[in-house]
Image: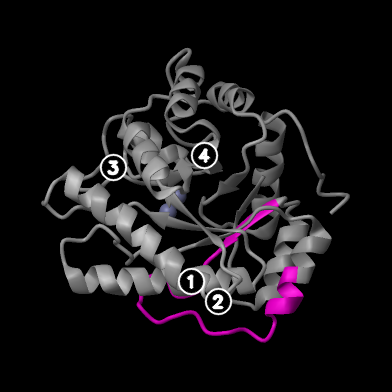
Amino acid sequence: MGRHLPTSGGLRKTLALAAEQGCETLQVFVSNPQGWAEPVPRADAEAFAGGMEELGISPGVAHAKYLINLASPREDLRENSVRALAAELVAAGGLGLDLVVVHAGSHGGEGEKKGLDRLVEGLERARELAGDSGRAAEAVVENSVGAGTQLCSTFEALGEVSRRAGARVCVDTAHAFVAGYDLAIPGGPGYVAAELRAALGEAVALLHLNDAKNESGSHRDGHRKVGEGMIPEDSWKELFAALPGVPLVMETPYETPEADAEEVRRVKELAGGLRKTVDEG
Ligand SMILES: [Zn+2]
Ligand SMILES: [Zn+2]
């Protein structure tokens, strides 16, 4: 259990926050997620990798740029996306991070089939490009809310990409909920977990643990803190029980470090087991 953390104060600060909050996993950006500028090599990369190991943080995760759309109908955007993802895989690997979460993207009106073909091809090309560097992180594909022409709002579509590209996936619980996987109804979490296992088997690398701002089926994104959105606390307990051992990363808004630490603690409690308590950290 961990959360997305800022890197703005330097990576040493990021590690300090992770320790303070009792994080067992963490997620960061390795470049500006809103721009195409590639990640810059960091002098503190080795220290960060060592620090994560010391704290027992695993997996370490990077979230790829939001601009990346491997499925775009525009060739120039696909090229930029492949190059950007490859650069992030290399940069994340250099920081000792294990996974890079990339959005499934949008087919842009050319249909789901063509979009999925392009996504699979883009993943393969990005990995190939990054592979030459010898130390790349693993690309995992995130489910969408299914707005407009977005791909992979269903576990079936995510499963198809996973099988064809040989890639594991990240399932965002808020995205799944608004895409129609209703975790709020009685029996919902068990059913959704079973659907997930049926479509993806062991290919679920990670959950993005976010509560949803909007109703199930609304296809409208928006994260809330766990327990403060549409999904009741009992549902979370049921979901965690049905998916034992799957790493969790929260992407809820930052508050004070104390409030963020409390949120991590509360979710660990809901998950019914603490691998590492804040006191030990
Ligand atoms: Zn995401
Ligand atoms: Zn997410």
Residue 19's spot in the image, x, y percent?
77, 59
Q: Secondary structure beneath disc 1?
A: helix
Q: Is residue 223 left or right of residue 160?
A: right
Q: Nearer the viewer, mark 2 or mark 3?
A: 2
- How many numbered circles are shown? 4
In the rendered view, tell whether residue 25 sits above or below residue 172.
below
Few, some or many residues within 10 Å of mark 3 (<14, 14–19, 20+): some
- The reply to whether discs 1 and 3 touch (Cβ–Cβ < 8 Å) is no
Q: Answer yes or no: is residue 204 visible.
A: yes
Q: Is residue 27 magenta?
A: yes
Secondary structure type for disc 4 = helix
Q: Earlier in the sequence, mark 3 or mark 4?
A: 4
Find out if the beta carbon at label 2 lies less than 8 Å from the nearest ligand 1 atom: no
In the rendered structure, which segment of residues is drawn in magenta? Answer: 25-49
The dot on residue 220 is: 3
Whether the magenta-drawn stretch holds residue 106 is answered as no
Asked whether the beta carbons under mark 1 and mark 2 sit within 8 Å of each other, the answer is yes
Question: Which three-letter amino acid code belongs to the residue tagged 1?
Answer: Ala
Mark identifier at residue 203: 4
Q: Residue furthest right?
A: 280
